[in-house]
Image (tube, rainbow, N blue to C red):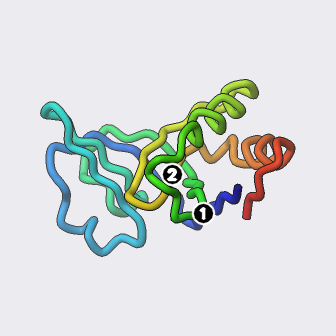
């Protein structure tokens, strides 16, 4: 299985709504659930005064992945947990993404490659 490291430096933030400037960003995610919004964006798109965490890098599983595929995130998450790397994961229609703190990028890539994953 192949993962691609996306070229974006990303931040997680709480946001009650999707800021207008986000729509032009090269990469963004907005999840609204139970009255709380979570935004994943480049730093320049963070809402003013937002509580944010980061920077993160995103790894995308090369897809499309069938919706019936089982255990993809679980296996990668377990491998990275064993070396102390936490993930923020989410799924899109054709693939899954994981965010890892930028400072763990090298360790995460080495761990995944040692487990047989291709990482570009």
On screen, residue 59 versus residue 82, left or right, reads: left
What is the spatial separation of the Cα atoms under label 2 and label 1, in whole angstroms? 10 Å
Q: Position of residue 37 (x, y in %)?
A: 22, 41
* Mark 2 or 1, nearer chain start: 1
Q: Nearer the viewer, residue 111 or 57?
A: 111
User: Mark 2, mark 1: which one is toward the viewer?
Assistant: 1
Pinpoint residue 35: horizontal percent, then vertical percent: 13, 33
Residue located at (57% from left, 53% from top): 57
Which residue occupies the foreground of this view, 49 or 117? 117
| The C terminus, quarter of image | bottom right
- Asked whether 90 or 40 is in front, the reply is 90
Residue 62 is marked as 1
Where residue 97 is drawn, which disc sits there?
2
Position of 40 with respect to 18 (left or right) is right
Is residue 42 toward the left or the right of residue 18 in the image? right
Left or right? Give the position of 24 relative to 96. Answer: left
Q: Residue furthest toward the front?
A: 68
Q: Is residue 85 visible?
A: yes
Does the image show residue 55?
no
Question: How far across and how far down the image is residue 12, in percent?
Answer: 39, 44
Characterize the local packing of mark 2: few (<14), some (14-19) or many (20 or more) Cα atoms within 10 angstroms.
many
Locate residue 25, reporting x and y percent: 35, 70
Please say if the residues under marks 2 and 1 sit with CB atoms less than 8 Å apart. no
Q: SS for tag 1? A: loop
């Amino acid at each position: 299985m192949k993962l691609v490291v996306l070229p974006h430096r990303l931040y997680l933030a709480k946001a009650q709504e999707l800021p207008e400037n986000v729509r032009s960003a090269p990469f963004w995610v907005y999840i609204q659930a139970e009255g709380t919004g979570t935004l994943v964006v480049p730093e320049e798109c963070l809402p003013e005064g937002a509580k944010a965490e980061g920077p993160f890098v995103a790894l995308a599983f090369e897809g499309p992945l069938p919706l019936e595929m089982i255990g993809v995130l679980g296996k990668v998450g377990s491998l990275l947990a064993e070396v102390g790397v936490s993930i923020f994961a989410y799924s899109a229609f054709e693939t899954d993404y994981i965010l890892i703190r930028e400072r763990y990028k090298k360790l995460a890539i080495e761990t995944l490659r040692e487990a047989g994953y291709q990482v570009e």
